[in-house]
Amino acid sequence: MADANPSAAAPSVTRCGRCQAALTDSERVPAQDRFFCRTCYEILKLQLRTAAAGMKENVNYPMAALGAVLGGAAGVLAWWGFTVLTGIGFGLVAVAIGFLVGHGAARGAGGKRSVGLQVLAVVIGAVSFLVAAYLVNMTFINQALAEQGRPFRVPFPPTSPAMFYNVLAVNFGIMKLVFLAIVAYEAWIIPRPVRLAPPA
């Protein structure tokens, strides 16, 4: 009698991605590109929920605020610096403010994520955007004053809330509102809490 064909491979066995136990069709639970036994799947779900809950606890808000302020300052300098170097008030650069503030808040808090961090980041992001818009407008106004030979210069920081408002109001149209909304959205979405699917 001839031997069996050695090239004929035995049927592959699906194994748990965690404990490596052999799984039947009724025992395996799919998770992305792997399969787990029901026990390991429940353990992994519990670990994920515990980790997600821990990200909302003991948030270091002072350090988060410092990180957000530093991120905002970097974004302000990027937009204002681009304006000074190129002579163009390219508002799309302002989008970096929301990105930097959101990441600064999350990193400053040690990787934590919470609604409180989202609110903090949005407030600091909006303030940073308004400060940057003031600096950009101040630069163009002072250039125009210099060309006219007038000695007055718009200062920074502004000497009064009225001055801040009046300088900020120059060419503050629909596109500035759009950029402000993008900044707020990015600052909100980056430190958002991790949301897991509800238990089945």
Image: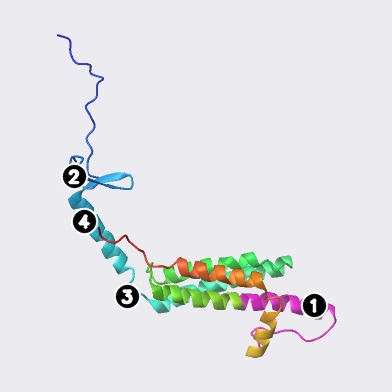
For the residues bearing labels 1 and 2, Cβ distance under 8 angstroms: no
Residue shown at the point (20%, 43%) measured from the top left? 20
Left or right of 198 on screen, residue 122: right
Q: Quarter of the image holding residue 81?
A: bottom right
Of the two numbered discs 2 and 4 on the same chain, state the one appearing first in sequence: 2
Q: CA distance from mark 1 to mark 3?
A: 51 Å
Left or right of 162 on screen, residue 23: left
Q: Nearer the viewer, residue 118 or 96?
A: 118
Q: CA distance from mark 3 to mark 4?
A: 24 Å
Identify the magenta region: 131-159
Q: Quarter of the image holding residue 165?
A: bottom right
Query: Does the magenta-highlighted stretch encompass residue 134?
Result: yes
Q: CA distance from mark 1 to mark 4?
A: 67 Å
Q: Which of the image's four quarters has the N terminus? A: top left
Give amino acid for label 3: Asn
Determine which residue is flagged by label 4.
43
The image shows residue 116 at horizontal and vertical percentages of: 40, 76
Determine which residue is flagged by label 2.
27
Q: Which of the image's four quarters has the C terminus? A: bottom left
Task: Tell me the element at label 4.
Answer: helix
The image shows residue 15 at horizontal and vertical percentages of: 22, 40
The image shows residue 19 at horizontal and vertical percentages of: 19, 46
Of the two numbered discs 3 and 4 on the same chain, state the one appearing first in sequence: 4
Determine which residue is flagged by label 3.
58
